[in-house]
């Protein structure tokens, strides 16, 4: 995944750029970068943040960065921002998303005798590819539209130019872009939570495919939004920050409603409700409030020394970090029938370990209620699950166990209430050692978010998709 932040100000923008970008740290753990423009040109700083925090890496660089306009990114993929020289002039660029047809686009570029300078591990830098697509046209507006039209998947971007910052949301709006304003400055962000403590207020949610040009005086629409939107539902379920809003809908409020929906469809006898921290907490509070059952914290996170575990490249280390960060409280667990809410179950490896930890600590029963349906299809549109193959998904593992093939009858396994779906859930329940397992129904998740289904991407659960 990833997230970006950009500022155009009448004053020096570096402080806002630094903290605004840092507020996207929950979206990535691999690389961070900042670029600013001033009278002398462009300045840039990029660091690996796999074993440290964005603030720790970039704070020493701040005295050397000066400018009234800048862009920043936290990414789990390529090193950004890139600074590009072209017939349009020099510009800096950051991107968020996933280009499904990158090889096809690269081959077309090779056919035109173009080359790529940014190669890491033998792979083409997707941000450089986007920059190349932009420079095929005679203006930034036309170039960004060109990129939006030919890219399959998703690509939102900020482009820092002498005229200001172009902010563009991907063609189907899978990732959000929001404009904020305050006196003497405007900003563009992937997350609205970056605005509040920097004194920005929300000015505009970009629509799918919309392009605006931001300056210190305001923002001007350069391309109107399209009519079709497929915003990622997982923003509200999992990787969005609780204080953020997308399409005007707050993340934490949706999680409360998800938990309440789980509770209304449940009558299991339990003593208490808990959430797998952090993203499961809001769902659990909604469940506990709806049923009037005490909410407890049988796990606490120890964070002072452990790095983030959102998406380390090494899965074994990711599992280890997740285990070591959560400390059980035996006095709250022993003898209890505990129901846990979680945002989702992907592979199940970490959850299985947590369930065993609870039983060792004396839990009488352990029930699980994920806030979304069973994950059956890997994400094709965002990099947050790029490293997961089909058989990494616990739902597909259960299908293979039941059918001998992970691809059999997926349309039936995706629908709650069918015999095959029920059998799949029972297989997962047994595999994880749970007393009971019950997933959120897709229609209840959609209702909790509050947007029509045709405006949400639900591919992970039902396989529906648009390119």
Image (cartoon, rainbow, N blue to C red):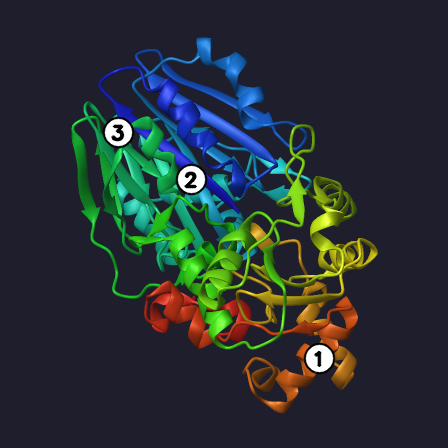
332 or 169, which lies in front?
332
Disc 1: which residue: 426
3D distance between C-alphas at marks 1 and 3: 55 Å
Label 1–label 2 contact, CB within 8 A: no
The residue that label 2 is drawn on is 131
Residue 164: assigned label: 3
Q: How many numbered marks appear?
A: 3
Res. 107 visible in picture: no
State which mark lies toward you, 1 or 2.
1
Numbered disc 2: secondary structure: helix
Q: Residues within 10 Å of mark 3 (few under 14, many from 20)?
A: many
Which quadrant of the structure image shows residue 269?
bottom right
Residue 215 image point, x, y percent: 22, 29
Element under label 3? Answer: strand
Task: Give how far across and how far down residue 36 sits, in percent.
Answer: 38, 21
Residue positioned 40% across, 59% down in the render? 254
Whether residue 74 is situated above or below residue 69 in the rendered picture: below
């Amino acid at each position: 995944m990833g997230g970006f932040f950009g500022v155009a100000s009448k004053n020096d923008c570096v402080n806002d750029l630094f903290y605004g970008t840092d507020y996207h740290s929950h979206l990535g753990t691999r690389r961070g970068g900042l670029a600013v423009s001033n009278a002398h040109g462009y300045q840039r700083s990029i660091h690996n943040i796999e074993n440290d925090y964005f603030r720790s890496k970039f704070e020493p660089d701040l005295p050397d960065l000066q400018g009234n306009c800048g862009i920043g990114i936290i990414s789990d993929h390529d090193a950004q921002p890139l600074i590009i020289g072209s017939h349009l002039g020099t510009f800096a660029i950051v991107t968020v998303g996933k280009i499904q047809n990158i090889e096809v686009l690269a081959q077309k570029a090779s056919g035109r005798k173009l080359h790529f300078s940014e190669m890491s591990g033998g792979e083409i830098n997707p941000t450089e590819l986007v920059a190349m697509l932009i420079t095929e046209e005679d203006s930034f507006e036309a170039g960004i539209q060109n990129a939006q039209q030919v890219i399959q998947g998703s690509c939102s971007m900020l482009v820092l130019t002498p005229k200001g910052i172009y902010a563009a949301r991907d063609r189907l709006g899978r990732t959000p872009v929001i404009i904020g304003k305050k006196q003497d400055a405007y900003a563009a962000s992937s997350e609205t939570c970056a605005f509040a403590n920097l004194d920005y207020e929300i000015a505009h949610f970009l629509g799918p495919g919309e392009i605006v040009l931001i300056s210190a005086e305001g923002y001007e629409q350069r391309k109107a939004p399209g009519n079709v939107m497929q915003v990622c539902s997982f923003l509200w379920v999992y990787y969005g920050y609780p204080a953020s809003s997308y399409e005007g809908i707050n993340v934490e409020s949706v999680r409360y409603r998800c938990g309440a929906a789980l509770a209304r469809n449940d009558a299991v006898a339990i003593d208490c409700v808990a959430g797998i921290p952090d993203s499961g907490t809001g769902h659990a509070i909604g469940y506990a409030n709806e049923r009037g059952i005490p909410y407890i914290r049988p796990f606490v996170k120890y964070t002072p020394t452990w790095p983030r575990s959102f998406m380390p490249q090494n899965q074994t280390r990711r599992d280890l970090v997740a285990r070591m960060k959560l400390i059980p409280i035996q006095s709250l667990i022993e003898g209890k029938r505990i129901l846990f809410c979680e945002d989702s179950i992907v592979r199940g490896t970490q959850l299985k370990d947590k369930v065993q930890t609870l039983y060792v600590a004396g839990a009488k029963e352990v029930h699980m209620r994920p806030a979304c349906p069973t994950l059956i299809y890997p994400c094709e549109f965002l990099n947050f699950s790029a490293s997961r193959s089909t058989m990494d998904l616990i739902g597909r593992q259960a299908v293979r166990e039941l059918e001998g093939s992970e691809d059999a009858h997926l349309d039936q396994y995706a629908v709650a209430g069918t015999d095959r779906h029920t059998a799949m859930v029972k297989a997962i329940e047994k595999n994880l050692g749970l007393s009971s397992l019950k997933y959120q129904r897709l229609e209840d998740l959609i209702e909790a978010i509050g947007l029509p289904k045709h405006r949400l991407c639900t591919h992970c659960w039902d396989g529906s998709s648009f390119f």
